[in-house]
C-alpha cells in the first residue's frame, strides 16, 4: 500500500500532522512570550513557526499533485473520491481519521495564529506609546505663536521664547 495513492497520501498527512504539532507548540509559546513581552523569544518562535508553515505548504502542494496525478480533484471532493476508491483497503479508516485530525489541527492553528496576531498588535501599541514618551519632541512640532497669542499654522523658525 505504501506506493499506492492512499499510502503516499497517508505519508504526506503524517508529515503535515508532525509539522502542525510543532506549529501548535510554537503558537502556545508565542502566546506566552507575548504576555510576558519577551520580544527576542517571539522573534525566534516566529521564525521556527514560519519554517514549519512553509513545510506544511510544500507538503500540501505535494498532496494536491498526488491527487491530480491520480485522477482526483485537488479538493475535499477529490480526497473523498480517493477514500471511496480504496474503501476495501483496511488502512482507509485510519487514513480518514488522520485526515480529520489534520483538518481540526489546521483550524486550531489558524485560530491560535489569529489570536496571537491580536496580541502582537497590543504589544506593538505598547512599544509605540513607550517610544513616544521617550522620544523628545522635534522642532517641527514646536508651535509658533502670533501676536494675539494664537498658535500659527504656518511653519516658522521662531519659537515662543524668541518672539
Image (cartoon, rainbow, N blue to C red):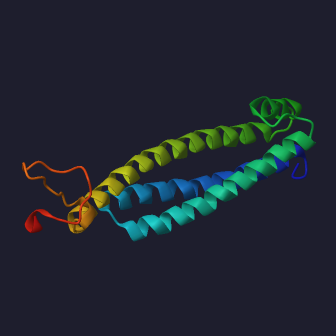
| Residue 83, image quadrant | top right
The answer to whether residue 94 is above or below residue 161 is above
The answer to whether residue 147 is above or below residue 93 is below
Q: Position of residue 100 (x, y in %)?
A: 65, 37
| The C terminus lies in quadrant | bottom left
Q: Position of residue 105 (x, y in %)?
A: 57, 44
Say whether residue 85 is left or right of residue 103: right
| Residue 34, image quadrant | bottom left
Which residue sits at x=79%, y=47%? Answer: 63
Closer-to-camera residue (97/15): 15
Q: Residue furthest front?
A: 147
Which residue sits at x=54%, y=65%? Answer: 47
Which residue sits at x=33%, y=56%? Answer: 123
The answer to whether residue 78 is above or below residue 118 is above
Q: Position of residue 108 (x, y in %)?
A: 52, 42
Say whether residue 27 is left or right of residue 67: left
Q: Position of residue 156 (x, y in %)?
A: 24, 61
Evaluate whether residue 66 shows in this view: yes
Closer-to-camera residue (98/108): 108
| Residue 49, image quadrant | bottom right
Evaluate whether residue 138 shows in this view: no
Closer-to-camera residue (121/46): 121
Which residue sits at x=51%, y=62%? Answer: 46
Tally the marks: 0
Amino acid at each position: 500500500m505504501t506506493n499506492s495513492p492512499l499510502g503516499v497520501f497517508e505519508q504526506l498527512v503524517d508529515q503535515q500532522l508532525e509539522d502542525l504539532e510543532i506549529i501548535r507548540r510554537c503558537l502556545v509559546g508565542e502566546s506566552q512570550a507575548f504576555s510576558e513581552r519577551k520580544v527576542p523569544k517571539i522573534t525566534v518562535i516566529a521564525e521556527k513557526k514560519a519554517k514549519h508553515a512553509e513545510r506544511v505548504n510544500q507538503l500540501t502542494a505535494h498532496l494536491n499533485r498526488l491527487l491530480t496525478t491520480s485522477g482526483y480533484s485537488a479538493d475535499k471532493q477529490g480526497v473523498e473520491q480517493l477514500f471511496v476508491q480504496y474503501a476495501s483497503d483496511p488502512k482507509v479508516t485510519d487514513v480518514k481519521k488522520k485526515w480529520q485530525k489534520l483538518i481540526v489541527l489546521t483550524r486550531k492553528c489558524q485560530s491560535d495564529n489569529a489570536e496571537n496576531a491580536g496580541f502582537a498588535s497590543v504589544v506593538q501599541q505598547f512599544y509605540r506609546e513607550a517610544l513616544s514618551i521617550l522620544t523628545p519632541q522635534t522642532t517641527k512640532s514646536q508651535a509658533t505663536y502670533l501676536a494675539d497669542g494664537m498658535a500659527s499654522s504656518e511653519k516658522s523658525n521662531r519659537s515662543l521664547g524668541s518672539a
